[in-house]
Amino acid sequence: MEVSRRCLPLAPGGYLHARPAGFRGKYGEEPLTSSPVADESEVLWHYTSPAGLHGILTTRSVYATNGRFLNDRDELQHGLGLCRSRVEQLKAENHPADGPILPRISYELSSMRDFDVFVFSLSSRTDDLPQWRAYTPASGGFSLGFDKAELESITKPFGFRICKCMYDWQSKEAELRRWIDSNFQNYRAGWAELNSRSANGGQHNSGSSVDPLVELASSFAPRILRGLYEIVATFKNEAFEHEDEWRLVSAPIKPGSAAVQHRSGRLGLVPYLDLRVAGPTGRLPIREIWVGPGADKDYSEAGLRAFRAGTGGAFVISVSTVPFRTT
């Protein structure tokens, strides 16, 4: 059955929430450490089937899958468990500022009902036998080389960012702790100033009838949660470290968004975002396409060259040097 395509619009301000960047203003702004990492990889590769290749080239979009439906979804649950443990430790500190904020964060981490994160998987490894075997059919597949900087520039207005996956648990735990602690430090500093001003008879100039201390907590809680969900979306099991995976990660969005579509998959109906990845001129940020190993890779190469000639594509075509496999 053909899937209807509702691509995210090219203009900013579409369906996705803006990516959180901490509490702006005098209380500081904490970026995510898992934002783009300095790395020698200028091109990132997406391994796919002939149908996947055709879909990307003709629609100029990719599918970003709901993180809960990935084959390493246990990593998501483990990461959220680390978040809950750190929140429990903060509760034990009994800081007077935390009353309005910790119960909300604890509840939402337990329910996980408020946000979903969507990802598109990539790798820094070119012509990699394990990934040909894992992500392309035995009859042959393709690997698309995306320009990392250009891809992020195109998708950033929709709340996406490119980040490197984390595999060892020490790094994962340190990243989560840094995000939680830095945000709580800023939150507590803001609470102390507002509380001091109130105790001294000062006036708050927020223009709101809401208690400023409650308003501060309401501002920080969703930012902390969204950041945590984004970070956890980069967690991979150590067994996959050889893949050197990178992910194009969405800002968390609320379930039920009109942008979310569904396709049939091994786990039933899989939620995804149809993300347009062509620039303003319609050009895709694809530098090179590799033809994967297979008995008929010469035909695959010929077909791809004919497609490129007919559509005016500018990508380089390379053919895998990996020995043909029969299983």
Image (cartoon, rainbow, N blue to C red):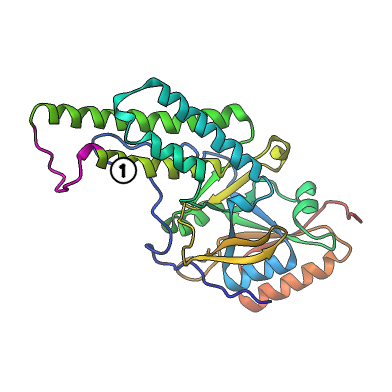
- The reply, left or right, for residue 154 in relation to residue 290 is left
Magenta run includes residue 292: no
Q: Quadrant of the N terminus?
A: bottom right
Q: Is residue 206 above or below residue 47?
A: above
- The reply, left or right, for residue 96 in relation to residue 318 is left
> In terms of secondary structure, what is the magenta stretch mainly?
loop
Name the residue nearer the viewer: 323 or 247.
Answer: 247
- The reply, left or right, for residue 301 in relation to residue 42 is right
Span shown in magenta:
202-213
| Residue 223 quadrant | top left
Where residue 211 appears, as percent x and y from the top left, is 20, 41
Residue plotted at (63% across, 40% down)? 75
Q: Which residue is mark 1?
A: 218
Residue plotted at (25% across, 32% down)? 190
Badge 1: how crowded within 10 Å, few (<14), some, or many (20+)? some
Kind of residue at badge 1: Ser
Q: Count the labels in the image.
A: 1
Where residue 163 appears, as percent x and y from the top left, is 54, 44
Q: Is residue 38 above or below residue 312?
A: above
Where residue 179 appears, as percent x and y from the top left, is 44, 33
| Residue 169 quadrant | top right
Magenta run includes residue 211: yes
